[in-house]
Structure formats: C-alpha cells, structure tokens
Image: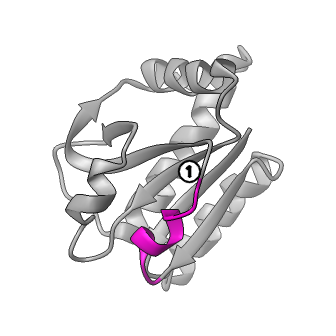
Amino acid sequence: MNIKVVLEGKLKESFYKTGAFEYQKRLLGRVEIIEVNNIEEYIKNKQNAYIVTLEIEGKELSSVEFASKLKEIEQDGFYNEILFLIGGAQGLSKNVRAKSDFKFSMSKLTFLHQEAVLILIEQIYRAYKILNNEPYHK
C-alpha cells in the first residue's frame, strides 16, 4: 500500500527533513512526502485513495489503535493508496475536509505543519513495528 504524506507547503528546516528522511529510509520506501501548493488541487482527481485529514477536531488514537487503523485500510482491498493531508498555516479548506474518509487528530495541541510531518511519519513507522510484532513501540 502506498502511503503519501501530503503537505501544503514545504519542509524547510533541515532538522525536520533529516528526521523525516530517516523514517522514510526505515520504512523502505513505503511512505512518500509530497509538498504541494494546493492540497485541494492535488486530490481533485484522486480515485481509490483513502483520505486522512489531520485536524484538531479529528479522532485521537493511541499508537496501537493507529496501527490497527492502517491495517484495516490496507485490508479493505478497495484503496490503492492512503493520503495523509496536512494543511499549511491556514489549515485545510472545508472542501478538503469534506472529502476526508477519516479525520485524525494527533493531539489537541497545534503543531507546525513541519512538526506534524515528522510526528506522523514516526507514528507510521511505529505502527508497522507494532503490526510486525517488532520491538520499538513501548
């Protein structure tokens, strides 16, 4: 299953890039980070994509629950990719939020979009460790 973390904006700070690249490497190419100017345009023609929007109002999950959610999406058989959408400074538009299959909150705290990318990709890595019964998540 292809997983794409779609960021409205750019990973500018080198320490965020370094951290994100490290987890991408550990995930053996399963996760791609896409930087776009307009998420709404990016998802306009996406079919068979499971869309997860990162929103403060979304559902909070533990790491184990998050791993189960990824497994559930992958096993559904309908979707060929998972898109995690992270808005820029203004957040996600109503139109993008309306297309969401799952509204996900990593916390009630607000993060910089660059921080959100790093935290999310680390949690994706952790989820696969959990699903493969490998040590890391405790």
Q: Is residue 40 magenta?
A: yes
* Residue 113 magenta: no
Percent position of residue 2, x then y: 72, 46
- Identify the residue at the far right of this view: 28
Residue bearing mark 1 = 121
Q: Is residue 19 left or right of residue 51?
A: right
Type of residue at label 1? Ile
Q: Please tell me which residue lies in front, 119 or 69.
A: 69
- Point 66% across, 26% down: residue: 74
Q: Residue furthest top?
A: 133
Q: Residue at x 31, y 40 (%)?
A: 103
Q: Quadrant of residue 125?
A: top right
Where is residue 75, by image quadrant?
A: top right
Residue visible at 59% across and 74% down in the picture? 17
Number of numbered discs visible in the structure rendering? 1
Q: Looking at the rendering, in which quadrant would you find the N terminus? A: top right
Look at the picture and state if 119 lies above or below 9: above
Give the extent of the magenta segment: 37-46
Question: Tag 1's secondary structure?
Answer: helix
Considering only vertical position in the picture, is 113 above or below 12?
above
Q: Residue at x 34, y 26 (%)?
A: 61
The color scheme shown is one colour
Q: Position of residue 109 (x, y in %)?
A: 17, 51
Write down the quadrant of residue 115 in the picture: bottom left
